[in-house]
Amino acid sequence: MADSLDAYLVLAGALFAIGTFGFLARRNAISMLMSIELMLNAVNLAIVAFGSFIPELKADGSVIALMVMAVAAAEATVGLAIVIAIYRNRKTPLVDEYDAMRR
Amino acid sequence: MDTLIPLIAGLPLAGFVITAAIGRRLGRRAWWIPVLAVGASWAIAMVVVATALTGGFAEGSYTVRLWEWIPAGDFHVEAAFVVDNLTAVLLIVVTTIGLLVHVYSIGYMAHDPAGYWRFFAYLNLFMFSMLLLVLGDSWLTVFVAWELVGLCSYLLIGFWFRKNTAALASKKAFLVNRVGDVGFALGIMAIWVNTGTLNIQESIHVLTSETLVAFPIPVWVIALLVFAGAMGKSAQFPLHVWLPDAMEGPTPVSALIHAATMVNAGVYLVARANPIFASAPEAMVVVAGIGIFTAILAASIAMTQTDIKRVLAYSTLSQLGYMFAALGVGAWTAAIFHLMTHGFFKGLLFLGSGSVIHAVHEEQDMRKMGGLAKKIPHTYWTMLIGAVAISGIPPLAGFFSKDEILGEAYKLGFAWVWAIGVVVAIMTAFYMFRLIGLTFWGESRVDKAVEPNVHESPRVMTVPLWLLAIPSLLLGLVLAWPGPPLGSLLGLEGPGLLAGWLEPVYEHGLEILGRHEAEFAIFGIDGVLILVSIAVAVGGMLAAWRLFGVEIGSLRRRAEPAQVKSLSARVPFLYRASLNKWWFDDLNHLVFIVIGGRVAAFAWWFDAKVVDGIVNGIGAVTRRSGGGLARVQTGHVQNYALGIAVGLIVMAGSYLMIAGR
């Protein structure tokens, strides 16, 4: 079981689904950011799995995974900064009360 | 010559500019610059005319090129003056009558010191425009001058613009003229399309020469378009309605612009373009028909009008109709002959009527005149000469020109033009002597308050009258000599002075028409035609004497108002039609004000409701649908994220389904 690509992909898919659900269902902005991290990491897992099971890819999979981590870190920084800025303004972390675009 | 010819037109222009600039300060002395300018212009013109008519120009014409006006690719227009014999003849009329009217105006406008300088400035501007019109070398120059004389006419009709009727009349003249001018402008464009040049002589030459390629625009269309312009300016039916109203202007203006010069511009134009008309015989029939119809229409109206100036205005219309009839039948010399003689005697009659109006203190209604012959003898005698001249009694000027028109019309196969022309001749003699009878003979019907103050005009006004009376007496004789009809009676040979002058101008046109000089036989058909002309003129005169009285020396007869009344009661329809000018003003009111107003109102409604409605409707639909669609935008981040997720799933799913097949 441990040397099967499918197992990794199922795990990655499950993690991605959880992340998506969390992003769509949670109202708290911090939770939504965490869900995004979960999705990113699910994708990273899939990439690394592909990289180790398919020899033609050589080190490409690992490089892409590193790239995704860097981007994820940057995204988390920016996202948190935005959430903090909005929180200072609206005094709430709940995204369904961020409806200024509607007005 | 290179300096003299531009000076003819340049001096009045300078007079206008100077008077317009400093005239206000000169007050009552404002007349001397304009009169001097026109006087000098007249003297120069006479030199040029003498040179031209004695064959002083090698090629029959003399062109002064000033500068290239419009150099634009293959569109070249030169600013140039050209003098040929036709121009020379027109110069005689324009400058001579112009000068005399200027002198007359010194006296006539004396009681309007505030407008003095303005009046003379306008008159000078008109002289410049009119001279430019006859001297112009290209269609474009003529068109500019054409519009300028129209402008001057507008300014001078509305000279007393505080009077509502005068302001309205000037507007009417301007608008009606525009209708004709559109035709003229289109005609000029058509000429350029066909020939690629706007030079009058060159374009006529191209238009009338035999070419293998057909013109894009047929020549008869050009002829009719040019004639449309002539109809507007020369007030031919149905554009005749502006001229009678133009009598709201000061009387010298009526004499100069609306009788002797500007209204002749149309005749000049058609005569100038004679080869074009000669190549389009259909168009010539139209010209003849409209001309003779205008002649009889206007003459019938003139018989019952009571305003002295209006009678003369309708008479002018009628005589212009004669000229166009002559142009239409191909008797171009006769048309220009009548233009000249008519210019002098109608200018005389108008100036005389101004003197009468002056004498009875601005009263124009002939029913409030009568018995003025003794009180204003100079005016009376000169006007009597004018009336005899226009009636066509030999040997005065009108007889020769009118008889030539009628005789030529008959001999060239237009018997219907001749027949109507003879009827018009009776009417002409009748209404002229009705005018003389009502104004000068019989008992005085002048207001009791004005009666003792009736006075002859100052010498500055009577001298021009006498100076115009001389050509009214003799011009016909001089210009026809030694040709028919008198020359042949005395055994002299020759085409007559004017016919000789104009021969080179018409040579080309007559060649196209394929016409040769008809033999003149004083004891044949021509003698009969002359006798008929004289008989109808005398008949009309006698009829007027019988009804409206006569007092010349021992020749006396009392007016019979009762008989006039019973006669007009016998033909009530005709009488009312004549009195109401055949309801043309009412017809125009109906067509253009009432119906045209409705159409305009409908167009406005259409624009406001339908056109604007469509535009506004599109806006409203966009706004509403936008408002509806805006509800989709909740502003909640998660809704958008859901949209992205669903979209992604659908896309990925459909890809998998298609790829998996």
Image (spheres, coloured by chain):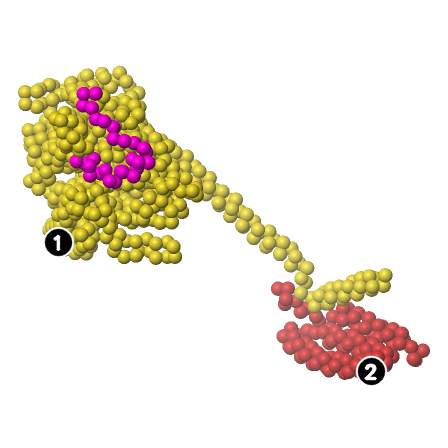
Identify the amino acid type marked 2: Lys
Q: In the rendered view, tell whether residue B169 sits above or below residue B391.
A: below
- Residue indicated by mark 1: B26
Distance Cα–Cα, label 2 vs label 1: 109 Å
* In the image, residue B330 above or below residue A13: above
* Snapshot quadrant of residue B529: top left
Residue B67 colored in magenta in the image: no
| Residue A45 can be seen, yes or no | no
**What crowding class fits label 1: few (fewer than 14 Cα within 10 Å), some (14-19), or many (20 or more)?**
few
Residue matched to label 2: A58
Q: What residue is rendered at 19% in x and 56% in y? A: B21
What is the chief secondary structure element of the magenta stretch? helix
**Residue at 63% over, 54% down:** B625
Residue B109 versus residue B47: which sits nearer the camera? B47
Q: Magenta residues, as a range?
A: B497-524
Q: Could you say whether the residue bearing mark 1 is in a helix, strand or loop?
A: helix
* Residue B46, visible in the rendered structure: yes
**Residue positioned 80% across, 78% down in the render:** A44
Closer to viewer: mark 2 or mark 1: 2
Chain A is which colour?
A: red
Q: Residue at x 43, y 43 (%)?
A: B213
Residue A63 got which mark? none
Would you identify the image quadrant in which residue B449 lies? top left
| Residue B581 at x, y percent in the picture | 29, 28
Q: Position of residue B654 (x, y in %)?
A: 80, 62
Residue sitting nearer the eye, B326 or B33: B326
Task: Find numbered disc 2 in the image and state the secondary structure of the residue it sits on.
Answer: loop
Q: Amino acid at mark 1?
A: Leu
Q: What is the count of numbered marks?
A: 2
Q: Position of residue B24 (x, y in %)?
A: 16, 54
